[in-house]
Image (cartoon, rainbow, N blue to C red):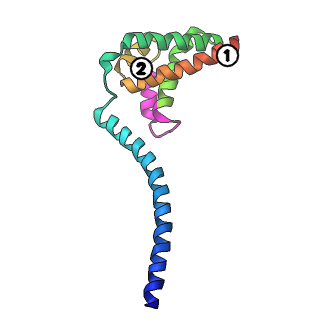
Amino acid sequence: MKNNLKTNAKTKKGGRHHHYHHHRHHNDKHKRTLKDRINKHILNQKDICCEEYFEREKIINQIIELYTKYVLKLLNQPKEEIPESISNDISLLIFKNSSKNIKLSNDIDKQTKTLEDIKILLKEIPLYLLLSLLAYANIKANAVNQLNT
């Protein structure tokens, strides 16, 4: 009987302790897993849903307008720098400062020397990347607005 009490006490104590940690790790794991599941879903689908609800041409024009504002007013660079700025940010959004895909990044740079090249690229990239670039362009343009206030 004495043995059973010790075993039960250990099990109960260990079980409670384990349950607490399991619950905490389960929540952390669940958060990561949800992100992983969403990423996996997008990768399997090749893009996010419902491109038909977006007017790609208008989004592209907005991106170019925002980058024009950013390059000319904040960077004080000539308009010829707009394609390079957009190209650099596309690479930034794709590669997260990784040097693993230098060739792809270089290919993007080579194919985006003019605003017309940029428009062609933006028509071809996945919608999630186009919308990410629009959001990033808005952030940069807001930095210009903050300087002007």
Which amino acid does the dot numbered 1 rest on? Gln
- Which residue matches tag 2? 111
**Lower position in the chain sequence, tag 1 or tag 2:** 2
Determine whether, in the image, residue 10 is placed left or right of residue 42: right
Q: Which mark's residue is nearer the viewer, 1 or 2?
A: 1
Q: Quadrant of residue 147?
A: top right
View extreme (front): residue: 1
User: Which residue is nearer to you in this view: 18 or 87?
Assistant: 18
Helix, strand or loop under label 2:
loop
Estimate the spatial distance between the alpha carbons at disc 1 and disc 2, rounded to whole Å.
Answer: 33 Å
Drawn side of residue 25 relative to residue 50, left or right: right
Q: Secondary structure at mark 1?
A: helix
Marks 1/2 in contact by CB < 8 Å: the verdict is no
Q: Quadrant of the C terminus?
A: top right
Indicate left or right for 77 with 32 as reference. right
The numbered disc on residue 19 is: none
Q: Residue at x 53, y 19 (%)?
A: 137
Q: Label 1 belongs to which residue?
A: 146
| Front residue of this view, candidates 129 and 8 | 8
Would you say residue 98 sits in the magenta stretch? yes
Q: As shown in the figure, which amino acid type bears the numbered disc 2?
A: Gln
Viewer can see residue 99: yes
Magenta region includes residue 76: no
Find residue 131 and report its image quarter. Answer: top left
Residue 139 at x, y percent in the picture: 57, 21
Q: Residues within 10 Å of mark 2 (few under 14, many from 20)?
A: few
Residue at horizontal 42%, vertical 31%?
Answer: 104
Does the image show residue 75? no
Look at the image and give the residue range highlighted in magenta: 94-111
